[in-house]
Image (cartoon, helix red, strand yellow):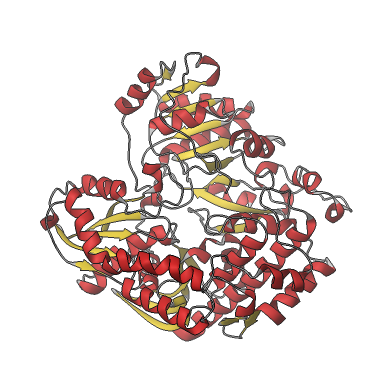
Amino acid sequence: MAKLILGISAFYHDSAAALLSDGEIVAAAQEERFTRRKHDLSFPSNAVRHVLHEAGVTSREQLCAVAFYDKPFLKFERLIETYHAFAPRGLKSFLKAIPVWIKDKLFIRRLLQDELASLCPGRGPVLFPEHHLSHAASAFFPSPFESAAVLTIDGVGEWATTTIGVGKGNSIQILRQLDFPHSLGLFYSACTYYCGFKVNSGEYKLMGLAPYGNPDSPETRKWRELILEEILDVREDGSILLNMDYFAYATGLTMCRDAKWEQLLGIKRREKESEPTQPYMNLALAAQQVTEEVVLRLARTARELTGESLLVMAGGVALNCVANGRILRAGLFDDLWIQPAAGDAGGALGAAYAAHHIWQGEKRQVNNRADLMKGAYLGPLYSSQDILRVARRFAAPHVEYGDFDLLCRDVAELLAAGHCIGWFQGRMEYGPRALGHRSILGDPRNEEMQRRLNLKIKFREGFRPFAPAVLEEDIGEYFDLDRPSPYMLLVAPVRVEHRKPLPGGFAQMGLWERLYHVRSDIPAVTHVDFSARIQSVNRNISERFWKLIRAFKERTGCGVLVNTSFNVRGEPIVCTPEDAYRCFMRTDMDILVMENYLFRKQDQAHWQDSGDWQASYELD
């Protein structure tokens, strides 16, 4: 009988569930996709139900164990010791946090047993690997490497904020650990907060804003120096010490002590939703530069400590694809692999892997040619009947294609004509990136595509960049990258021959002038610094998406598409055909393709919103 292990992450942000069968990933999904609450932190009932259904599990006795992604008692110990160390500061935070812990979080074992009983009757072992071990396991065990250095960086788990370890066979050994409150992830979140974005969801916005900063500006250089002199002490090995006079997160209800930052930097915290001005772009760049330097030093230390020539990474900071690209270009390792669900959602998978390989001692099967993530296409799959039910419910005219290749040719023609396409195929992605199964697509050569996608479809800030999805075999034709990047976790330069020269006064241009200046012959996916966050598409892993890009190349000569997640601002990526149709109808998308069915916006005259579903367009 197969050995089944259920992994769960919950109660902080990005709750998720994952299921292993004899070490193979059966399914994994985030709770937000089902509840439509972005970064949902509740117990992942829907995600658990999905992954159990995929394996045909109806009784708890069929599971060897349930693994939760951190140790609640250790986390509680950290909270109590932190409040004691900073007393009398933090009374308001203490009075808010501790009752919740005493009422619920200290009894997570019982809570998990009770929640699971309604989904999967019975009782069984519940395991609690440490938070950063779950991250490390999610990075190493599904990687294509026999052995590797392991680097995990995030805000905080129980105590650890950063770990360096080594993975060999079915074991992981942690060699170095940096503890709370000194955290690179929390430093970056504090900068995110000060630049006017929401913590735990706006960090990628800070990364997207940073290239608009002027690296030659005296202001940028000054702020970088002030950060390193007053806020963050960076050691040669990449360990850091934060000056806690500048931070409130240890015992407060905000990230920063705003008055201290304002006194040091000379600018107030940016008002949410105000247009980013040059000082905030320069501050974002300074913060990104410091973060990259710390990550590079940590990677160098990992190489020296382990002697390994390969690196795997996880934790929220591992989603900083600009820093990842810097590691690759530095030549510290022969290759690196990053868990596509690197944040807390991936902890569910890591907890299950830790239980399988470390607790059960099961041997690891490695495929040196590919990882075990199945392209991160691990979520729900919907049938033609599911799509037709939605079409009937909304009286939605559509065209069914019996020949998928013909569908691709027609969609390629529509893309080349400037249309924006909602693309819904196969199993939903696990992790924060849409990788061609729940995507909005466009023509990267179109100078207006970035503006239209941001403002008319995504309803988000105009400076936000888009990723190119490129045929894996063509990656070197467009980008200075010599290997696949299947999970959109590496940034690399656009090749020089595709660039267009910038005007002499580019750094002095306003945001909107710079934003829409044509920088390359694929301007919709080229950032202001001539970089791109790349997704390479492999025919064997995502054949339908590969076929569409191939058809677009045959039609236009360009083997690249704009790929952004199928959602609007404040809403999770769509999960079901109904989610997709509603999002399509509420935005300026022209075409929706679900499996072999094509819906044209101009034909949807009978669309009526039933009002029983609300897109969460809250500002984030």
Question: What percent of the width, then of the height, locates residue 283?
Answer: 73, 64
Left or right placement of residue 274 versus residue 30 in this view: right
Count how many numbered circles sit on residues in the image: 0
Residue 38 vs 4, above or below: the answer is above
Question: What percent of the width, then of the height, locates residue 163?
Answer: 45, 77
The residue lying toward the viewer, choosing from 114 and 562, is 114
Q: Is residue 185 visible?
A: yes
Residue 460 vs 333, above or below: the answer is above
Left or right placement of residue 42 versus residue 494 in this view: left
The residue lying toward the viewer, choosing from 607 and 51, is 607
Q: Quadrant of the N terminus?
A: bottom left
Q: Which quadrant of the structure image shows residue 50?
A: top left
Q: Is residue 307 visible?
A: no
Question: What percent of the width, then of the height, locates residue 507?
Answer: 83, 56
The residue lying toward the viewer, choosing from 107 and 547, is 107
The residue lying toward the viewer, choosing from 609 and 217, is 609
Q: Residue at x 61, y 38 (%)?
A: 459
Q: Residue at x 71, y 82 (%)?
A: 229
Left or right placement of residue 364 versus residue 179 in this view: left
Q: Which quadrant of the structure image shows residue 308?
A: bottom left
